[in-house]
Image (tube, grey):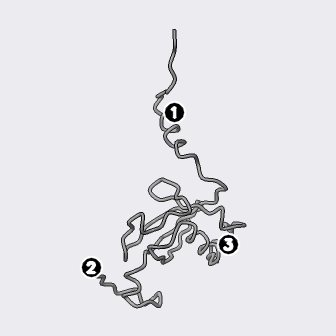
Amino acid sequence: MHICFFFFPFRYGLSSVAFCQKINLRLILVSGKTKEFLFSPNDSAADIAKHVYDNWPMDWEEEQVSSPNILRLIYQGRFLHGNVTLGALKLPFGKTTVMHLVARETLPEPNSQGQRNREKTGESNCCVIL
């Protein structure tokens, strides 16, 4: 059973019960601008991108994108695929979770991060046959 105690959910026009069942996301743009949104644990990264696109904040006007399909979420340094839900990430109810929101046509390849780290450390996967 999950119990929440809050004093501020009414500013969002929600009852405390409804607020307890929502995840508060603070989205940060590359420019550093932030905005908070409430989502359900069943919402996917694609759902979030669509919602943000459809409700684009007025103070983000300079960063407006042409389509929700290019909006990508980054959580703990990793790009989220569109079908990943907030519930699958086990994000806490009633606390603010921070994610970055970027405009990018495609997601990087899964191993590209590992390859970049090997390049920085000087590691190599090649061998020499004599």
The mark closer to the camera, 2 or 3, is 2
* Residue on which disc 3 sits: 61
The mark closer to the camera, 3 or 1, is 1
Q: Secondary structure at mark 3?
A: helix
Who comes first in sequence, dot 3 or dot 1? Answer: 3
Question: Residue 25 appears at what percent x and percent y?
Answer: 47, 71
Question: Residue 99 appears at what percent x and percent y?
Answer: 49, 63
Q: Quadrant of residue 102?
A: bottom right
Residue at position x 48%, y 70% from top? 26
In this rendering, would 69 be left or right of 95?
right
Foreground residue among 12 and 105: 105
Q: Are marks 1 and 2 in contact (CB under 8 Å)?
A: no
What distance separates the C-alpha of mark 2 from that of mark 3?
41 Å
The mark closer to the camera, 1 or 2, is 2
Q: Are marks 3 and 1 in contact (CB under 8 Å)?
A: no
In this rendering, would 21 be left or right of 51?
left
* Residue on which disc 1 sits: 119
What distance separates the C-alpha of mark 1 from that of mark 2?
47 Å
Who comes first in sequence, dot 1 or dot 2? Answer: 2
Q: Is residue 41 above or below residue 108?
A: below
Question: Residue 71 appears at what percent x and percent y?
Answer: 62, 63
Q: Secondary structure at mark 2?
A: loop
Q: Quadrant of the N terminus?
A: bottom left
Q: Amino acid at mark 3?
A: Glu
Residue at position x 48%, y 34% from top? 118
* Residue on which disc 2 sits: 1
Q: Amino acid at mark 1?
A: Glu
Q: Amino acid at mark 2?
A: Met
Foreground residue among 21 and 56: 21
The furthest residue to the top: 130
**Label 3 neighbour load within 10 Å: few <14, some 14-19, many 20+:** few
